[in-house]
Image (tube, grey):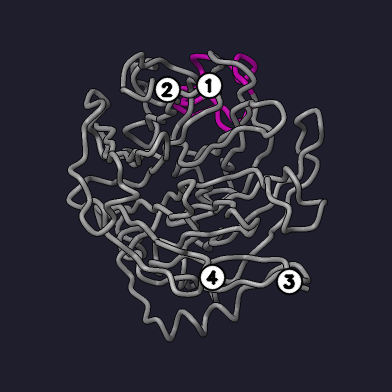
Amino acid sequence: MAGLAALLSHAIAPSAQAQSLEQIQLPPGFRIERLTGDVPEARGMTFSPGGTLYVGSRGAGKVYAVQAPLSGKPVVHTVASGLTLPIGVAWRDGALYTSSVSRILRLDGIEQRLSNPPKPVVINNQLPSETHHGGRFIAFGPDGYLYVPIGAPCNVCTRDEGRYANVMKMKPDGTDLQVVAKGVRNTVGFDWHPATGELWFTDNGRDWLGDDQPPDELNRAPRAGLHFGFPYCHAGNLRDPEFGKERPCSAFEPPVARLGPHVAALGMRFYTGTQFPAEYRNNIFIAEHGSWNRSERIGYRITRVVIDDSGKAVRQEVFAQGWLQDGQPWGRPADVEVAPDGSLLVSDDMAGAIYRIRYAP
């Protein structure tokens, strides 16, 4: 874990950020710019209806509000601090929700109080307290419930499936906590298909089975109650050397797509804007945070997955790369978010930055 800690603590000067941004490779016609570099360890993102971008963080323990993020002169406010791994943020009915490992918090009326934020209200404090895979991406689903993942508190182990290695959901007031999907090692990004309303999510594969296995996963949950294999089976076809003898891979839901091995696929979004060309509509964009225990680093990029009307992944390709240069990263994409103008925002927790990708041929 020392290598990971070193990467997360790495700081980069604004001038170096600007210079490095020129190294980002995109498809023809696309452009990238840095909106702000003042969001240390930026992670999950969500917009309010008023256009404020809220951003969670990892080790910084803070939640930020980026006012007028697309104006060219964004203003960054710290609206919460002293939290534990508040990587997830979600908006509903005038309030900002944020995760903090064992707790889900709510900041009421925050949009009118960015310079003098209210004290967070605890709506649920009954989640597991382990910090290993304890950073929780959160989002409200089409059913009005707040979805909260509970990662496995280990690399690979068996624990109560009603408590760990799953995706859960609760009402906005923190009640009616229930399991949606099991056998999910650690998802740090999910979204719902714009047409079907089905839940899709990334999942990080286990470590220490070599450089090239298992791959990370992109999964689809058309209904509640499905099991996606952890810890018995990885990526749909790889039996775990310790636990695989207990249950066969055929007993579980296979992934829609196998991503790169150890790429640390985190935030994902369906592209629902119209600023990109039409062929990008309803494609999936995934932030690959990058490997930490692979002999040759991989990831540190944005991947595009094209799916057909039946939900089958027909193609995956690199959409944006260049945060890794000569085996050394200067940035680590953590989340993606479709902006109100149809551009795609990318958070970078290593550089403490938010980028915007636009189609501007």
Q: Which residues are magenta?
A: 230-253
Where residue 169 is drawn, which disc sits there? 2
| Amino acid type, residue under disc 3 in the picture | Ala
Q: Residue at x 44, y 28 (%)?
A: 147
Crowd tier of the residue under label 2, counting other residues whose Cα lies within 10 Å: few below 14, some 14–19, many 20 or above? many
Q: Residue at x 29, y 55 (%)?
A: 114
| Amino acid type, residue under disc 2 in the picture | Lys
Which residue matches tag 1? Answer: 143
Crowd tier of the residue under label 3, counting other residues whose Cα lies within 10 Å: few below 14, some 14–19, many 20 or above? few
Pointer 3 or 1: first along the chain: 1
Left or right: 353 in relation to 296: left
| Amino acid type, residue under disc 1 in the picture | Asp
Task: Out of 306 and 131, give the one closest to the viewer.
Answer: 306
Q: Residue at x 48, y 20 (%)?
A: 182
Where residue 360 is drawn, which disc sits there? 3
Q: Assess whether mark 3 and mark 4 are in contact (beta carbons under 8 angstroms).
A: no
Which residue matches tag 4? Answer: 324
Give the percent coordinates (x, y) of residue 246. Answer: 49, 14
Q: CA distance from mark 1 to mark 4?
A: 39 Å
